[in-house]
Amino acid sequence: MTDTTDIHAVYGAPPRDVIEAPEGATRFSPYVPGSADFAAVPPASLASATLLAPPATAERRHVLALALRALKPDGRLVAVAPKDKGGSRLRKELEAFGCVVNEEGRRHHRICTVRRPDAPVGLDEAIAQGAPRLDPGLGLWTQPGVFSWDRIDPGSALLIAHLPPLAGKGADLGAGIGLLAHAVLASARVEHLTLVDLDGRAVEAAKRNVADPRADIRWADVRATGLTPASLDFVVMNPPFHDAGTEDRQLGQTFIRQAASLLRKGGTLWLVANRHLPYEALLTELYRTVTPRADQGGFKVIEAVK
Ligand SMILES: C[S@@+](CC[C@H](N)C(=O)[O-])C[C@H]1O[C@@H](n2cnc3c(N)ncnc32)[C@H](O)[C@@H]1O
């Protein structure tokens, strides 16, 4: 980016019936594989930024601060969020950065419009608080906003506790920062492992966490085709069941279908899920045997052989 005077940015996916981003705006989103990195936009370079602010506080303040840093003086920021997912806190957070806020409401969202102040305050601190870091407790690279970013998910821990040493070629679908992959690659008989995740920040962390020549780490949507080599010996996953913050059981079911299409006959799926999720009927339809291997703390571990 050299002359960015007229560049407009849109971050995330602000609902179109709430706010329209300027036509031709450059899209930034950790959930759109291949999209540009918002943290890499040069300071004071954008004419405007329109964003759907994330629900979690550290992530939201990080993104707001990145936007304010990226705007040229007097550039316009429009930040939107559902009232109950951070929207009611937007105004105060922007005022704390030194902004004068014009706030409106539309369709259960708050819309805050500001001009970049001459001397915003606290941007560096908010950016640092939401930035990638090596978490000493986890011993892994992580970032606020990625799945279970500061603790080991109990479902994933249960799966790891029941996972036998695997062998051959496999995939970790929805690999996050690489926790399961770490456990899988502990087996010397694993020849190749493809990690796939939709969250570009998790993928960046996984690249640092899983420095293993057998690993191929991809920023991609599991719903896409041609993700991994076919005829896999195994798939591991803790599938997501939320899409854009709302429970979506079909997403987990799509992961199960994709795993079945990637596995060879006799290949094995190891899956952990919240106990209440209705995956058994689909598993029985697609796999030759379906065996519960653990049921603990609200989670179930299932082994399914195709
Ligand atoms: C429950 S987390 C599991 C993460 C990791 N495997 C672990 O055990 O810690 C599910 C992961 O799926 C990812 N995800 C959600 N939707 C996805 C999609 N459509 N394609 C690929 N990954 C997706 C999320 O970003 C998240 O990292």
Image (spheres, rainbow, N blue to C red):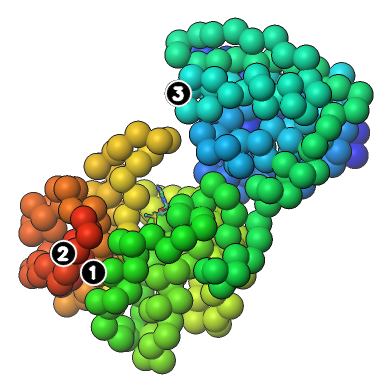
Query: What residue sits 67% from the left and 27% below the top?
Result: 93
Where on the image, by quarter, is ligand 1? bottom left
Disc with the residue nearer the chain's start (1 vs 2): 1
Query: What residue sits 80% from the left and 43% below the top?
Result: 124
Q: Which residue is mark 2?
A: 295
Q: Distance between the Cα atoms at labels 3 and 2?
A: 33 Å
Query: What residue sits 23% from the left and 69% below the top?
Result: 269
Query: Which label was assigned to residue 142?
Result: none
Quadrant in which the N terminus is drawn: top right
In the image, residue 146 lies at what x, y percent? 51, 51
Above or below, 119 relative to 103: below
Disc with the residue nearer the chain's start (1 vs 3): 3
Q: Three-letter amino acid code at disc 1?
A: Leu
Q: Quadrant of residue 35?
A: top right
Q: Nearer the viewer, residue 229 or 90?
A: 90
Q: Is residue 106 visible?
A: yes
Task: Rate crowding at label 2 as few (under 14), some (14 to 19) or many (20 or more) other CA atoms within 10 Å.
Answer: some
Task: Rate crowding at label 1 as few (under 14), some (14 to 19) or many (20 or more) other CA atoms within 10 Å.
Answer: many
Q: Three-letter amino acid code at disc 3?
A: Asp
Query: What residue sits 26% from the left and 62% below the top?
Result: 272
Relative side of 215 to 77, left or right: left
Q: Quadrant of residue 207?
A: bottom right
Relative side of 189 to 286, left or right: right
Q: Three-letter amino acid code at disc 2?
A: Asp
In the image, residue 188 lies at what x, y percent? 41, 91
Whether the residue carrying mark 2 lies under 8 Å from ligand 1 is answered with no
Whether the residue carrying mark 3 lies under 8 Å from ligand 1 is answered with no
Disc with the residue nearer the chain's start (3 vs 2): 3
Q: Which residue is mark 1?
A: 269
SS for callout 3:
helix
Q: Which residue is mark 3?
A: 84
